Amino acid sequence: MKKLSIFLTAILLLISGGKIYSQATQSDSFTDIFKQIDVKEIPENVFKLVGTDFTVITAGDPSLYNSMVASWGGWGILLEKPTTWCFLRSNRYTLEIMRKKETYTMTYFDDQYKKDFIQFGKKSGRNSDKMKENNLVSIQTPSGNMTYREAKLVIECKLTEVTTVSPDDFYTEAGKKFVVEAHAETNDYHKIVFGEITNVWIRK
């Protein structure tokens, strides 16, 4: 039995990239799975989280919510508050819900879930059932925001500002070209979205 236990532990380590998480079940509450930490205790580098792991932004409630994938953004201090920012196309359905609800989550996953959450970026939820066509299991935070049981890090945000960019804001030709081409597709410029960080949760 001891050898079998060691073998199973090794398999779990390989699957989870060296981390063993408690096995969440459908009956587990949010606080059974996650623990709250201070924003200064976020365990990973923002450049890795946003640029490599990618951000899943989710807005709404159990009756209607939508998720999207973002790879541009970060966080810092704005108006003396810990704040996230992201650079989003104006026609994002998730952005539409964010503006209505004024709260949202920024969620991060281990690599083993990338094939699942990357689907959120392949089509709009406005005219599809993409939120039902996924293996990830949604869960509501104690404050009412939506995220996923499989997450390793959940950042809850309160919307503070949505700013529209202009080609004149950019001092590189690549930046100007990017926002002009996006405008041609959506008839509007990208939005920079700022959100005050209200809660941070990591997997137990």
Image: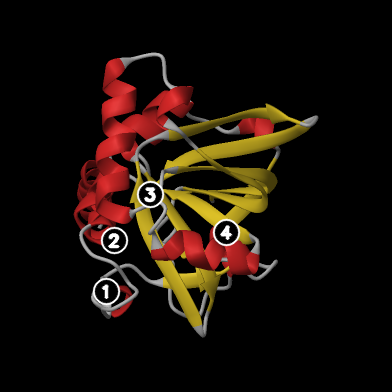
In space, the residues marked 3 and 2 are separated at their CA atoms by: 15 Å
Image mark for residue 89: 3
Instruction: Kindly indicate the quadrant of the structure image that contains residue 141.
Output: bottom right
Q: Are marks 2 and 4 in contact (CB under 8 Å)?
A: no
State the image coordinates of residue 195 (x, y, percent, origin top left).
64, 45
Q: Is tag 3's residue or tag 2's residue first in the polypeptide sequence?
A: 3
- Circle 2 packing at 10 Å, graded few (<14), some (14-19), many (20+), is many
Q: SS class of the residue under badge 1?
A: helix
Q: x, y percentage for residue 95?
A: 48, 59
- Rendered image: mark on residue 130: 1
Q: Residue 144, located in which quarter of the rendered image?
A: bottom right
Report the residue that reaches farthest toward the top: 171
Does the residue at mark 1 contact the one at mark 4 (Cβ under 8 Å)?
no
Q: Where in the figure is residue 158, as x and y percent of width and height? A: 68, 53
Query: What residue does disc 2 label?
Result: 120
Above-or-below relation of 186 to 50: below
Q: Residue at x 61, y 69 (%)?
A: 100
47 in relation to 85, above or below: above
- The secondary structure type at the circle numbered 3 is loop
